[in-house]
Image: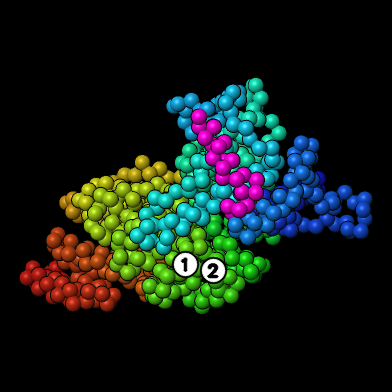
Amino acid sequence: MALNERETIQLRSALQEAVVKCSERCLYQSSKWAAELLNAIPEPQAGFDDPNNGACPAVVLTQNTEPDEAVLEAREINKYLLAKSLFDCREFDRCAAVFLPDSMIASIVATKEASTPKGKGKGKAPASSARSPSAPTLPQISQRSLFLALYAKFLSGEKRKDEDSEMVMGPQDLGACVNKQLLPISRYLEAWFDARKTEDGEDTDSQGWLEYLYGMVLARQKNEELAMYWLGRSVHLFPMNWGCWLEMTSLVSRVEDLNRLMPRLPQNIVSFMFHINTSLELYQHDNNLANSHIPDFVVPTTCDALLSYHAKDLVAAEQHFSRLLSLHPHRLDSLDHYSNILYVMNSRPKLAFLAHLCSGIDKFRPESCVVIGNYYSLLSLHEKAVQYFRRALTLDRSCLSAWTLMGHEYVELKNTHAAIESYRRAVDVNRRDYRAWYGLGQTYEVLEMHAYALWYYKKAAGLRPWDGKMWMAVGSCLQRMGRNLDGIKALKRALLAESYYDTGSSFGSTGSGPMSLRGAHMDPEILLQVAIMYESLDQDDDAKAYMEMRAPQGIMRGESIVIHNDDGSDEDGDGREGGGNGREGTGVTAATSKARMWLARHAMRIEDYTTANRLANELCQDGVEVEEAKALIREVRSRMDATGPDEES
């Protein structure tokens, strides 16, 4: 997204303002994002010594341009400085009490609830048109101080919720604890917005920060539609609050929802980056996303890496992350994804280096704990890996990678109950995490609860419809349930999935024969499974056709590690074989030998002894099932001798 000189100057000024204002309200992650983008913008060509140079605007000051707000901020500056200092010391309750004592909040909430008509749902503030005669009297404080106080109250409730849950995956950690401050905050904000409405229902002099907080609270209360409304209002009033955009990303569950939302948002560089980030969260791997970035800015570089990761191009993803690490060696953001890539590629030296690096920078960051946990998992020290994933969750219970990876480790430890709970908690954090849904399917399949496993596999396939591994799991589960016809359809979809968006194939038009799969990714394992299912349906001609496709394919196959590591043979739903199984996916495999053995026996049944003898000899050369192949050769020769010398070859 190219910017001209005037737009660059405006962006630089807006980002300077965003850094200051986000920092004033203790939104440190949003402030860091704005500061990173600000420093990634190329400096102007003219020197800084020229005061008349318009390309170098003055540093943004914190003075409020609204007269009433400026008077309030000046009047309460001492209290604000105290409250911010308490917030920085993580004394959230004391910070909130500077401007909003508990007694004041309780009285305002009680008055608000008494003035709310019965049957009126929570969060219906936009529908009200006039202030009620019994509306509560709100204190006269600035929006900046009010946001800081209510945000401190919100974080205090989050902190207490984690404390009530006690140990991660402990007896009290049932996922039922809630933030008890959500209702008081939402009631207070409803009263605040009601008090500022004009007679025609329009808000006056709002800055967008309280809309963001209200939307965040509504999202935690599962009132997602209204939350999206208030978050949208917030980004219109102050578009440089990246935390608000991320909150909106968490509420978008489908690509169709994103496409409907985009026209209603402000059209600027931040909404452009929001679209990229949300598309990645929805596992969209459009190549246009990879070509739309600002040079030397860390977020689009991360997007390039994640784009390659979701597209299974692990080599390219590793190169992007390696470049990012060289540019910002002390940056820990997204390194948990990098460790996943190194795990799948079985790159133990690089993963060891990354674990030591993260431990040296900050061993008590969730990302560092995930990286170290992956390293121990690669060493097959699964108990140690679980310990570090638990530590990551103790630091941040919303750490999605830690929940999913801990589920994988519990599967390795044969603790299916703990694995299911870990995956369920991952889904609670992010419903779009296909790895957790896939892990749930695999765990229930281990328990031979195939109906449950099928449901979870379908959820994963719905999130990743182009991923053949998902459809192979669906097909295999249907096969175990005795639904072979449906299983064949799912496996054919798995064959087409990898090349679907390139070829424009229609899954619904798939026929019954192998010619309908022309141009598809011919995975030998899937071909063998389809053939076996056709055999169980007594459709020998179709079974033979797929076996014949399978047998030569195993000889000619030569995929790279990218394809190999995402075959349907992995064990934990995250594409994590670890590379330790010794199967490179080239040359002779057990599946090729099974296909040849089936074809040889089929030739025996139809008395095609020449073909049976040739296939049996090839099996002896393969070195797989040699004894059975020799027995088959002896049987072929005996039958050929019995039929006469004219049949010999």
The circle drawn on residue 391 is: 1
**Which residues are drawn in magenta?**
92-114
Residue 547 among those drawn in magenta = no
Q: Is residue 259 above or below residue 443?
A: above
Q: Main secondary structure of the magenta part?
A: helix
Q: Residues within 10 Å of mark 2 (few under 14, many from 20)?
A: some
Colour option used: rainbow
Q: Is residue 647 above or below residue 126?
A: below
* Of residues 285 and 489, the one drawn nearer to the viewer in this rendering: 285
Element type at marker 2?
A: loop
* Of residues 102 and 550, the one drawn nearer to the viewer in this rendering: 102
Which quadrant, please, contains the C terminus? bottom left
Residue at image x 28%, y 69%?
590
The circle drawn on residue 364 is: 2
The circle drawn on residue 282 is: none
Residue 275 x, y percent position in the rendering: 59, 45
Q: Are marks 1 and 2 in contact (CB under 8 Å)?
A: yes
Residue 100 among those drawn in magenta = yes
Residue at image x 64%, y 69%?
330
Give, as a three-letter code, the residue at label 2. Phe
Residue 195 x, y percent position in the rendering: 63, 30
Q: Residue furthest left?
A: 642
Q: Earlier in the sequence, mark 1 or mark 2?
A: 2
Q: Does residue 546 appear in the picture of this structure?
A: no
